[in-house]
Image (tube, grey):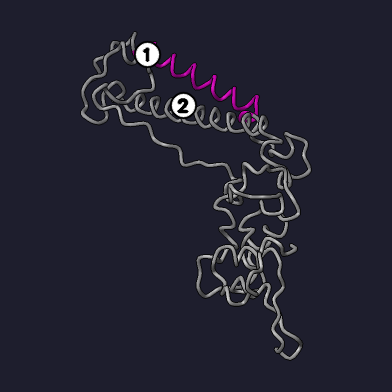
Amino acid sequence: MSHLTEEQSNQLYLQLLEEKLGLEKHFATNDHFGLSNSFKDSTGELSMYDNHPADVASEIFEREKDISLNEHAEFHLRQVDEALAHMEKGDYGQCIFCHSPISFERLQAIPTTLYCKEHVPDPEQSIRRPVEEQVLYPPFGRTSFDERNDETEFDGEDAWQIVESWGTSNTPAFAEDPNVENYNEMYIEADENVGYVESFESFVATDLYGEHVTIVRSKAYRDYMHSEEGDPFLEPENRSLDDEPL
C-alpha cells in the first residue's frame, strides 16, 4: 500500500503529466533542437571535409550543445514515462532497489525518481557519439596499414601525406616534428624515406650498368655525414662538409 495520500498522488501525477506534455511539445516544435537537419544544411556549406575545424568552430560548438540538450531531454522524457508507468502499476513512491518509501518532499523535488537517497545509481555515461567520428577517428583507421607486416601498399596515410605536402592552414606549432626548419617539412612523417629504404640510397648513384659509383652531395647526404652515420673515408682528407653546396 502506498504511503502517499490521494491528494499527494494527484499532485505528483499532474506534475509528471505537465512535464511530459511540455517535453513532447518541445520536440514537436523545434525538430529535436534542430538535429533533424544535417550539419551541412544548417551551415550552408557544400562540404565539411575540406574545412579546417577552426573554420566552423562556433557551428560545431552549437551542434555539440544541441546534441547534449536533446539527449538530456530525451532521457528526461523516458524518466517521466517510467514514473507514470510505476504510478499506474501502483508501486510509485517506493525505491525499486530496497522497496523503502520515498519521502513526499523528495518526490516533489524530483517526481521522476525511483530511488531513495541511499540507492541513487551513478549517472550513466552517454555512449552516443557524433556520427562524424566514424570517419575522423581514428586517423586513417580504415585505410592505414602501418601496423601490419603483411601490407606494404599505398594506403590512406600515404594519400594524406601527398595532399598535406602541398600545404595546409596549420602553423609549425601543429607540426608532428617540433623542430621543423620550413613548411615543406610539416606534413606527417615528412622525414620518411620515399622510394628507398636506407637514407644513403638517396645520394649514392651509379651509371646505367650499376658501375661508377658517385656521391650526390645533397642535403640528405650532408645530414647523413653530420650524424656520423657515414664512412669518413668516403670523403677526401681536409675537406669540409660545410663547403659543399646543397
Residue situated in front as seen by the camera: 24 or 206:
206
The Cα atoms of the two marked residues, 2 and 1, are separated by: 14 Å
Q: Quadrant of residue 89?
A: top left
- Residue 123 drawn at (x, y percent): 37, 31
Outermost residue, top side: 7
Amino acid at the residue labelled 2: His
Q: Residues within 10 Å of mark 2 (few under 14, many from 20)?
A: some
Q: Residues within 10 Å of mark 1 (few under 14, many from 20)?
A: few
Q: Based on the picture, tell me whether residue 16 belongs to the magenta stretch.
A: yes
Quadrant including the C terminus: bottom right
Q: Label for residue 76? A: 2
Q: Based on the picture, tell me whether residue 101 belongs to the magenta stretch.
A: no
Span of residues in magenta: 9-33
Circles 2 and 1 in contact, beta carbons < 8 Å: no
- Residue 28 drawn at (x, y percent): 62, 27
Q: Label for residue 109? A: 1
Q: Secondary structure at mark 1?
A: helix
Quadrant including the N terminus: top left
User: Magenta span: helix, strand or loop, mainly?
Assistant: helix
- Residue 35 drawn at (x, y percent): 64, 34
Task: Say above or below: 99 vs 223.
Answer: above
Q: Quadrant of residue 240?
A: bottom right
